[in-house]
Amino acid sequence: MGMISEFKEFAVKGNVVDMAVGIIIGGAFGTIVKSLVSDVIMPPIGLLLGGVDFSNLFLVISGDGNYQTIEQAAAEGAVTINYGVFINNLVSFLIVALAVFLLVKGINSLKRKEEEAPAAPAEPSEDILLLRDIRDSLKNR
C-alpha cells in the first residue's frame, strides 16, 4: 500500500474528521470566550474597582518614562510585566474549563442513564424452549 493511499485512509477515518471539527469549533469557542471576558465581564469588574482597564495593567521593570499603555511601553523598548493580560487570560481559562466541565458532566450523565436502562430480555434459545415444553408436559401428566 502506497504512502498516499495510507494517508488517505487515515485522513478519512471518522475519528480524524471528528477531531478536526472539534479543533475548529474549539478555536471559534475560544474566540467567543476571549471576547466575553475582555468585552463583557472585565469592563464592569474594572468599573467596580474604580475604572481600571485590566488589559492595560502592567508593571515596568526596565525603562524610563510614564507609559499609559502596554503598546506605548513596548514601542519605547520598556520591559514590562503584563499582569492585566494574565488576569484576562486566567478568567478566559476558567470560563472554558467550566464549559468543558459542564459538557463532560452532561455526557457522563447521559452515559449513566443508558447504563441504568434495563436491557431488553433476550429471546430464549431453542434449547430453553424445548426444556420448557418438556417441563410443561411432565407437569400435565
Image (cartoon, rainbow, N blue to C red):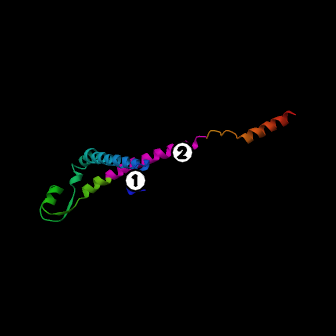
- In the image, which residues are magenta? 91-118
Q: Inspect the image, locate mark 2, and give the three-letter code of the amino acid beneath it.
A: Arg
**Element type at mark 2:** helix
Spatial separation of the CA atoms under disc 1 and disc 2: 40 Å
Name the spot of residue 32 as percent of width and height, x first.
Answer: 30, 45
Front position in the image: 126 or 111 = 126
Q: Is residue 96 magenta?
A: yes
Is residue 128 part of the magenta span, yes or no? Answer: no
Picture residue at 18% right of the left edge, 57% below the top: 70
Other residues around mark 1 within 10 Å, as few (<14) / some (14–19) / many (≥20)? few
Position of residue 44 in the picture relative to residue 16 (left or right)? left
Which residue appears farthest toward the right when viewing the image? Answer: 141
Secondary structure found at label 1: helix
Residue under label 2, please give it.
112
On screen, residue 66 versus residue 30, left or right, reads: left
Query: Which quadrant, please, contains the C terminus?
Result: top right
Cβ atoms at labels 1 and 2 below 8 Å apart: no
Give the total number of marks visible in the rendering.
Answer: 2
Residue 106 pos. (x, y %) = 46, 44
Q: Position of residue 66 (x, y in %)?
A: 13, 59
Which residue position is annotated with label 1? 5
* Mark found first going from the N terminus, 1 or 2: 1
- Quadrant in the picture for the N terminus: bottom left
Q: Amino acid at mark 1?
A: Ser
Given residues 132 and 43, the one toward you in this image is: 132
Residue at coordinates 79% horizontally, 36% vertically from top-left? Answer: 133
